[in-house]
Amino acid sequence: MDQVTINRVTLQPGIRQPITSKQVTSSKQAFLQHLHEATVKTELKVSKHANQRLIERNIHISDAQWQLVSDKVTEARSKGVNDSLVLMDQAALIVSAKNATVITAMDRTEAKNQLFTNIDGTIVLG
């Protein structure tokens, strides 16, 4: 019988630095910051065009109503809505939920004869 010699070779895996608790905390803080930015309520803006329409059509919306619209638009955005039709007692608004901006406004009687396109959500306020 021939003698067989087996040499043992120690395999060294790639050198990895251990993850420190400071790195974990930093990553967690970054995640929480992104989560906060994604869920924080953004103030609803009114475009110049929409503002002109509100004035021309004598549409008055109270601060409380604007706050309700803003809250509902934020909720719609969190559900994936990009562009919405907001129906109120006195007005119909086209709102970019994605940008939190009122695009245009009309009174409800005018809205009855309109066809709304490129809308992926509707908010009805009573």
Image (tube, rainbow, N blue to C red):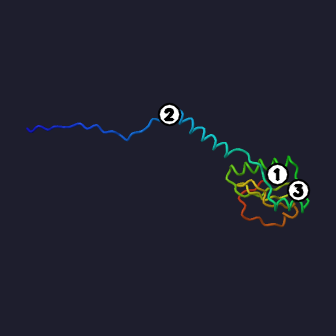
- Out of 89 and 21, give the one closest to the viewer: 21
At 11% from the left and 37% from the top, the residue drawn is 3
Query: Toward the viewer: 47 or 2?
Result: 47
| Looking at the image, residue 32 lies above or below residue 120 | above
Q: Which residue is mark 1?
A: 125
Give the residue at x 48% y 35%.
19
Q: CA distance from mark 3 to mark 2?
A: 58 Å
Q: Give whichever of 81, 9 is nearer the camera.
A: 9
Q: Secondary structure at mark 2?
A: loop
Whole-percent x, y for residue 110 in the image: 86, 64
| Residue type, numbered disc 3 | Gln
Q: Position of residue 118 (x, y in %)?
A: 71, 63
Q: On the image, which quarter does residue 83 sit in?
A: bottom right
Q: CA distance from mark 1 to mark 2?
A: 51 Å
Q: Residue at x 54, y 36 (%)?
A: 24
Count of picture labels: 3
* Secondary element at image label 1: loop
- Percent x, y of residue 88: 84, 54
Answer few, some or many: residues within 10 Å of disc 3's Cα (few below 14, many 20 plus, some between 14 and 19): few
The disc placed on residue 90 is: 3
Using residue 16 as the reference point, say whether residue 10 is left or right of it: left
User: Which three-letter amino acid code belongs to the residue tagged 2?
Assistant: Thr
Circle 3 SS class:
loop
- The amino acid sitting under disc 1 is Leu
Give the residue number, with chain letter if any, for mark 2: 20
Mark 1: give few (<14), some (14-19) or many (20+) Cα within 10 Å: few
For marks 1 and 3, give the CA distance: 10 Å
Of callouts 3 and 2, the N-terminal one: 2
